[in-house]
Amino acid sequence: MGYRKDAINGISWMVFLRGITRSLTFVRLAILGRILTPTEFGYFGIATLLLSLLEILTETGINVFLVQEKKNINEYINSAWVVSILRGVVLGIIIFLAAPFIASFFQSPEAAGVIALTALVPLIRGFINPAIISYQKDLLFRKEFSMRSFLFLVDVSISIMAGFMFRSAQSFTWGLIASALVEVILSYVLIPLWPKLVFETDKIKHVITKGWWVTLTGIFLYFADNGDNITVGKILGSGSLGIYQVAYKFSTLPISEITSVVNSVIFPVFSRFSEDKARLRNAFIKVTVGTTVGSLVLGTTIFIFAGPLITLFMGNQWGAAIPIVQVLVVYGVLRTLFGNFPPLFLSVGNQNYAAQMTLARLIGLAIFIIPLVTHFGMIGAGYAMLISMLFEIPVILFFAKKVLY
């Protein structure tokens, strides 16, 4: 059975989804960027750093396992739900209790309230019906598009309204909370298969064991992607962190969206014929060529027009972000060029390859991030991210040869 039509259809829907969500992201940035200060953005950045870290540390790989699973996933839904709920409760408690300590670490006591409020997000998300993954597993991308676009619209709308009401960093968090609540409701309204609170020890162990390398990859990926944010926030302060994160969004998000869109489709598609190496190789080459062309065109455009884009969308107070954007856009292009390899490795069950390639990038970042930020400031973080890719690329190519040939 051919999956080319499914892949093209899926990519089309995901492109549409990403176009809508990222357009709304820039609208939110443009509006809140004029209401809130860079320091307020930094406070929320600190909260999301903690949330992302803990989510990664407790990642069970449930979704990856359910997509990879060749058999009917219904028998694992109960176990997946139990694990998800427990994970959400633990995350919520840890974030709430850690709020004052994290705020103190970044020397931003005002961020404690934002961090504590963020504890509600994983707690709510833990109750999402895991059967919602069937949209991806069964290649039902139109339904995935409808749900995700609506959820993001809720997130953006609530955060903008909260911004006008409270004029604080908590505005972003209220958007996340509203979106999480709606997602929980929709996961039961849209999916007829409802999980039960049943402890099936063997199946729970099986799910967690299968997701071990996914968890490890996530940990490496978190620090490889956020080591720059942590360092900038710690050394340069929350104001610089806010500017740096806006620069990162403008430079890498539009480009990385190409990879995100494609990867959300090719992982379940590649998993369908992962045992046919020739077919897998041909499909992967076609996908990589397409994403390469797209990223180069978009990256060049952002590099040339970085100044006008920042001034137009964010205002003159964000001018310090312009040179950072031009450095990070090169990093974003490289990440896109090599961004199709992780779903390739996952599709053939080599989660360890994805973990090791990410570890290589993390090692490169760990070596250079502190000295470069200390000597060059925010732009030094961009240089460190760029250098980290030079550590990852040889590892990617080594494993790719093993998988494709």
Image (spheres, rainbow, N blue to C red):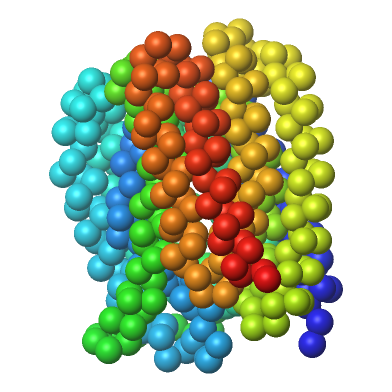
Q: Which percent across, then down, holds residue 278? A: 75, 77
Residue at left offset 49%, top offset 53%: 357
Residue at left offset 68%, top offset 46%: 337
Q: Is residue 126 visible?
A: yes
- Residue 8, relative to residue 205: is it above or below? above
Q: Quadrant of residue 137?
A: bottom right
Q: Which percent across, then down, holds residue 120? A: 31, 50
- Residue 96, relative to residue 403: is it above or below? above
Quick one: 321 or 281, which is closer to the camera? 281
Q: Which percent across, then down, holds residue 142? A: 72, 67
Residue at left offset 46%, top offset 24%: 381
| Quadrant holding the N terminus | bottom right
| Quadrant holding the C terminus | bottom right
The number of numbered badges drawn on the structure is 0
Q: Quadrant of residue 364?
A: top left
- Residue 350, relative to residue 366: is it above or below? below
Please state if 348 lies on the left or on the right of 266 as rendered. Answer: left
Quick one: 318 or 385, which is closer to the camera? 385
Q: Is residue 42 visible?
A: no
Please state if 103 lies on the left or on the right of 218 as rendered. Answer: left
Q: Which percent across, then down, holds residue 188? A: 48, 75
Residue at left offset 53%, top offset 78%: 68
Quick one: 160 or 357, which is closer to the camera? 357
Quick one: 267 or 35, which is closer to the camera? 267
